[in-house]
Image: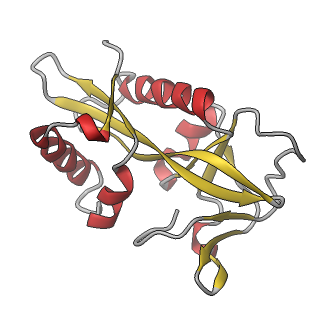
Amino acid sequence: MTAPQIVHTAYLEPATRTELRALLDEAFDGEFSDEDWSHTLGGLHALIRAADGRIIGHGAVIQRRLLHGGRALRTGYLEGVAVRAGHRGQGHGAALLAALEDIVHRAYDLGALSSSDDAHAFYAARGWQRWRGPTSVLTAEGPARTADDDGGVYVLPVGAPAGPPLDLGGALSCDWRDGDVW
């Protein structure tokens, strides 16, 4: 298996963007919205290609601010992590995560993602920890609870800046964005 190629959104050719969007639409069974696509852009992408050059795996790290314990944490947030059907169970997801986690460790205070129920065990086995406390989003009117997201947010502590340690049972807030905020 080849190592994932790392490419910033700015350097993705239009045809590659089109191929990525099609992969994500397929992998998420048509549930990958325009907002989800927008959330995936603007950071670093890990791409795995088959021998014929087709993209068979993708994941992105974008920067977000998460608030916890009175601190704003620079967070490498994972988006659009998927492996094409027929190529799953062959280590491609682990290779993608290894590359994305390396980026998080090198550039951020914390890693975070919102996981589908099917992927909880995958992330937990890699050291990602389920956020057990209440989640919310910062809106123009102030924080708003996102109770439907409780239990689906995972974090990867990577040596947060000086201050109190993470309290996985404490409150966690994300910055606002259209569509799914987590």
Q: Residue at x 41, y 72 (%)?
A: 178
Q: Is residue 57 above or below residue 78?
A: above
Total number of numbered discs in the rendering:
0
Q: Is residue 3 above or below residue 179?
A: above
Q: Position of residue 134 (x, y in %)?
A: 73, 68
Query: By what rule are the colours in the image chosen?
Result: secondary structure
Give the farthest residue toward the front.
Answer: 10
Q: Position of residue 121 (x, y in %)?
A: 57, 41
Give the farthest residue toward the top.
Answer: 1
Q: Left or right: where does residue 134 sit relative to residue 117?
A: right
**Foreground residue, 68 or 117?**
68
Give the farthest residue toward the bottom.
Answer: 141
Q: Left or right: where does residue 19 sit relative to residue 58?
A: left
Q: Residue at x 30, y 57 (%)?
A: 37
Q: Position of residue 71 (x, y in %)?
A: 78, 56
Q: Left or right: where does residue 13 sit relative to residue 45?
A: left
The quarter of the picture where residue 128 lies is top right
Q: Position of residue 161 (x, y in %)?
A: 79, 39
**Foreground residue, 157 or 44?**
44
Q: Residue at x 53, y 37 (%)?
A: 122
Q: Left or right: where does residue 31 sit relative to residue 73?
A: left
**Foreground residue, 84 or 157?**
157
Q: Is residue 179 above or below residue 10?
A: below
Q: Quadrant of the N terminus?
A: top left
